[in-house]
Amino acid sequence: MASGIFGKILEKLGFNKEVTKAAVATATKYPTGVGNFPTAPAAAKSVAISPVDVVKKLEGLAAKNPQKLDWKVSIVDLMKLLGLDSSIQARKELATELGCPVDKMADSAAMNTWLHKVVLRKLAENGGNIPKELL
């Protein structure tokens, strides 16, 4: 079982365990800053990545879900779609895990927007097939 909420997101989407462990370690060690996305050293990314079609998986889950969840723009809906706790406490925990700037943490709307972008970007960095328009 992966540690942290981001690790759970990776697991739910079918990322292999080696990638999940490396991604969680990298996300914690190299958090994303304000408006920029620093990259981890090459050694931290040396795990072989098998592509995961994130969009296809999420669209499949959305088609089966009785709720209309807009995972393409909402971190709450994305977390609900994956069967994860989407409460403000869980989102703050995820934001802390991914290095959300303090000023965004104080404003839940800004934090949610930041979280959604960073989660999709980190999924792409770890082999997730995310269209550029969602990044």
Image (tube, grey):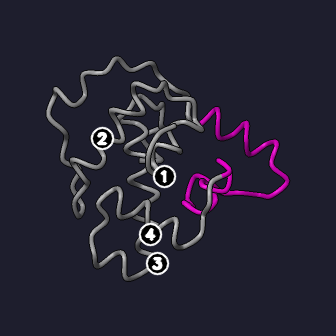
Circle 2 — which element? helix
Query: Looking at the picture, does residue 127 appear above or below residue 69?
Result: above
Amino acid found under the numbered disc labelled 3: Ser
Comes first in the chain, label 1 or label 3: 1
Residue at 55% from the left image edge and 58% from the top image edge = 73
Residue 41 x %, y %: 14, 34
Eye-nearest disc, 1 or 3: 1
Residue where numbered disc 3 is placed: 108
Tell me the CA gap for discs 4 and 1.
10 Å
* Numbered circle sitting on residue 5: 1
Eye-nearest disc, 4 or 3: 4
Query: Looking at the picture, does residue 102 appear above or below residue 63?
Result: below
Res 127 quadrant in image: top left
Circle 3 — which element? helix
Comes first in the chain, label 2 or label 4: 2
Region rendered in magenta: 55-83
Q: Residues within 10 Å of mark 4 (few under 14, many from 20)?
A: some
Residue where numbered disc 4 is placed: 92
| Residue projecting furthest to the bottom | 106
Residue at 23% from the left image edge and 64% from the top image edge = 34
Residue at 27% from the left image edge and 41% from the top image edge = 26
Whether residues under marks 4 and 3 lie with C-beta atoms below 8 angstroms apart, the answer is: no
Amino acid found under the numbered disc labelled 1: Ile
As for residue 35 lying within the magenta part, the answer is: no
Whether residues under marks 1 and 3 lie with C-beta atoms below 8 angstroms apart, the answer is: no
Residue at 40% from the left image edge and 24% from the top image edge = 18
Residue 128 x %, y %: 46, 32
Whether residues under marks 4 and 1 lie with C-beta atoms below 8 angstroms apart, the answer is: no
Amino acid found under the numbered disc labelled 2: Ala
Observer-nearest residue: 25 or 117? 25
